[in-house]
Image (cartoon, rainbow, N blue to C red):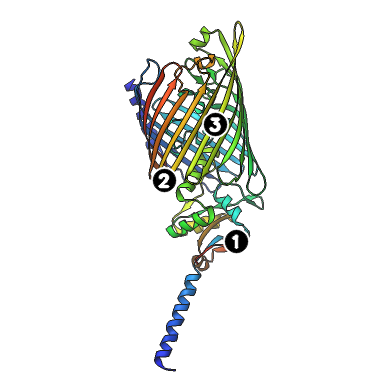
């Protein structure tokens, strides 16, 4: 095999690997690794983040917001609640004002988010799949969004 | 008056300075919100005891909620240039997935506008409220506060459609010197009688806010110190209303409308008499470029001149044609301007100009 041909194969391999890595960019719904939660469909998840009561084993499931990453927040708004930031913010304020339901807690810091998640096994949040794979404290429940 | 207003403003600012978000507790969730609004109002006509020709309003509405398991607490305190009042104080117990019973002081569920906005001015697109939705101390002629029991529930239909139902029974306001005065748990009186409210709403999608609904209201309003009422020999008013309302969003549009016939049985010393009036409004809002909203409202009340009951509230704005513009200048701040032609039973037509900054923290 000539050197040029070997280089070409290497380049093609690198491109394919990079494309595979990009294709794997996903946002996943996660819970604490010790959580008994395993199934939450899109409607239930939307309800959780809109202040409705969703229960598992008699416990209310809480949604925690991961606000540390702008792209992640944009995907959450688009894929989970299907609202603009403005509409979602007003919807939550309105819920607090009308029914006294506090807004979902927001976390800018990944460490604090994981701590909050592990302190309540019936809480969920969302993160990049690679971040979830790196952490032994969380388990992925389902894929919320995948890059085309 | 100016010194009095300055003192009120100082109190509001002091309360604002004290505002601080408390730390969350692991066994429950809590939230503290501060709704602030401020701005001038100019009236073209200034009747002697009606609205002043120029007013500056500063309102600080502090809302605290605490939720732990099935238990819920909600408190709302308003400190403004013209009043300081405990607006709501409710203790709730969630009886089902979408049902909750409350005890305490609350906003009457029969008034839809109040049920969605309360004193959260930032969430309300317009600066002014429709006549039929006015709070008692702002010229309202229907009770908006009650103290007693409130029950709210929802019944899910197919997919995400749902019926929502709210019912309350509690103490009604009295007809005070120049306004309705709701029962105050911090200063309880003995002459308050009963009030009952009900609202039934149909939501095609429970996760959205579009809805149409029906509201019913009944109350007994005791006269206590109102000069006009005493001149009429009026002892008590038995009031009933049935209203329909709509709150609908379609693309960038939002429509809010209500039609409410009100029947008043005037119980006098000599003879009883019944009068009625019909109040309606239609508000349209159009949002463009995500930050700007243009809005307008038409309000009309008929039988204003023949209603003995409305005679007790001569400066209530019963008719209005209004246009306004709102600019959301930051995530939770907005600037609004409103121009309207308003009418009261005693003052006739006049123009009104309102400018307001509103915000919510945090």
Residue B98, visible in the rendered structure: no
Is disc 2 in the same subunit as disc 1? no
Q: Chain of mark 2?
A: B
Residue at left offset 49%, top offset 48%: A88
Task: Check disc 1 and report its element: helix, strand or loop.
Answer: loop
Q: Position of residue B182 (x, y in %)?
A: 53, 23
Q: CA distance from mark 2 to mark 1?
A: 47 Å
- Look at discs 1 and 3 and give the one toward the viewer: 3
Residue at left offset 44%, top offset 80%: A14
- Look at discs 2 and 1 and give the one toward the viewer: 2
Q: Which quadrant, please, contains the N terminus of chain B?
A: top left
Which disc is residue A123 wearing? none
Q: Position of residue B250 (x, y in %)?
A: 52, 44
Q: Is residue B205 above or below residue A20?
A: above
Q: Earlier in the sequence, mark 3 or mark 2?
A: 3
Q: Which residue is mark 2?
A: B288
Horizontal side of B131 relative to B68 (left or right) equals left
Residue at left offset 62%, top offset 42%: B70
Q: Nearer the viewer, residue B327 or B2?
A: B327
Which disc is residue A34 wearing? 1
Q: CA distance from mark 1 to mark 3?
A: 51 Å
Q: Residues within 10 Å of mark 3 (few under 14, many from 20)?
A: many
Q: Which residue is mark 3?
A: B258
Q: Chain of mark 1?
A: A
Residue A74, visible in the rendered structure: yes
Is disc 3 in the same subunit as disc 2? yes
């Amino acid at each position: 095999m000539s050197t040029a041909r070997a280089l070409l194969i290497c380049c093609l391999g690198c491109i394919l690997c990079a494309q595979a890595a990009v294709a794997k960019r996903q946002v996943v719904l996660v819970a604490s690794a010790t959580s008994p939660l395993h199934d939450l469909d899109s409607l239930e998840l939307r309800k959780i983040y809109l202040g409705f009561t969703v229960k598992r084993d008699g416990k209310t499931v809480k949604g925690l917001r991961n606000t540390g990453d702008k792209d992640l927040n944009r995907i959450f708004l688009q894929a989970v609640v299907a609202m603009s930031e403005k509409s979602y913010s007003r919807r939550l304020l309105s819920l607090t004002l009308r029914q006294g339901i506090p807004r979902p807690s927001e976390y800018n810091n990944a460490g604090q988010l994981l701590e909050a998640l592990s302190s309540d096994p019936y809480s969920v949040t969302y993160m990049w799949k690679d971040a979830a794979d790196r952490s032994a404290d969380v388990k992925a429940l389902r894929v919320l969004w995948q890059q085309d | 008056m100016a010194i009095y207003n300055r003192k009120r403003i100082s109190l509001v600012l002091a309360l604002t300075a004290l505002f601080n978000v408390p730390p969350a507790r692991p066994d429950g969730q809590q939230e503290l919100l501060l709704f602030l609004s401020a701005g001038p109002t100019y009236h073209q006509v200034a009747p002697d005891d009606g609205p002043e020709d120029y007013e500056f309003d500063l309102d600080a509405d502090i809302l605290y909620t605490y939720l732990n398991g099935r238990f819920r607490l909600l408190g709302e305190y308003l400190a403004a240039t013209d009043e300081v009042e405990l607006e709501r104080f409710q203790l709730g117990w969630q009886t089902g997935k979408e049902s909750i019973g409350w005890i305490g002081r609350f906003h009457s569920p029969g008034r839809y506008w109040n049920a969605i906005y309360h004193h959260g001015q930032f969430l309300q697109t317009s600066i002014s409220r429709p006549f039929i939705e006015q709070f008692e101390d702002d010229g309202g002629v229907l009770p908006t506060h009650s103290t007693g029991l409130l029950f709210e529930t929802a019944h899910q239909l197919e997919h995400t459609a749902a019926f929502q139902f709210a019912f309350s029974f509690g103490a009604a306001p009295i007809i005070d010197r120049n306004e309705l005065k709701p029962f105050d748990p911090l200063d309880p009186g003995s002459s308050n009688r009963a009030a009952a409210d009900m609202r039934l709403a149909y939501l095609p999608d429970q996760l959205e806010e579009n809805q149409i609904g029906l509201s019913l209201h009944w109350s007994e309003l005791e006269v206590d110190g109102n000069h006009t009422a005493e001149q009429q020999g009026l002892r008590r008013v038995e009031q009933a209303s049935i209203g329909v309302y709509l709150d609908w969003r379609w693309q960038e549009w939002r429509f809010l409308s209500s039609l409410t016939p009100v029947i008043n049985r005037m119980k006098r010393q000599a003879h009883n008499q019944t009068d009625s009036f019909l109040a309606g409004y239609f508000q349209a809002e159009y949002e463009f470029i995500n930050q700007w909203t243009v809005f307008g409202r038409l309000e009309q009340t008929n039988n204003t001149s023949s209603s003995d009951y409305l005679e007790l509230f001569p400066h209530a704005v019963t008719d209005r044609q209004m246009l306004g513009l709102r600019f959301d200048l930051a995530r939770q701040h907005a600037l609004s301007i409103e121009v309207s032609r308003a009418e009261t039973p005693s003052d006739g037509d006049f123009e009104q100009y309102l400018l307001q900054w509103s915000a919510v923290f945090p």
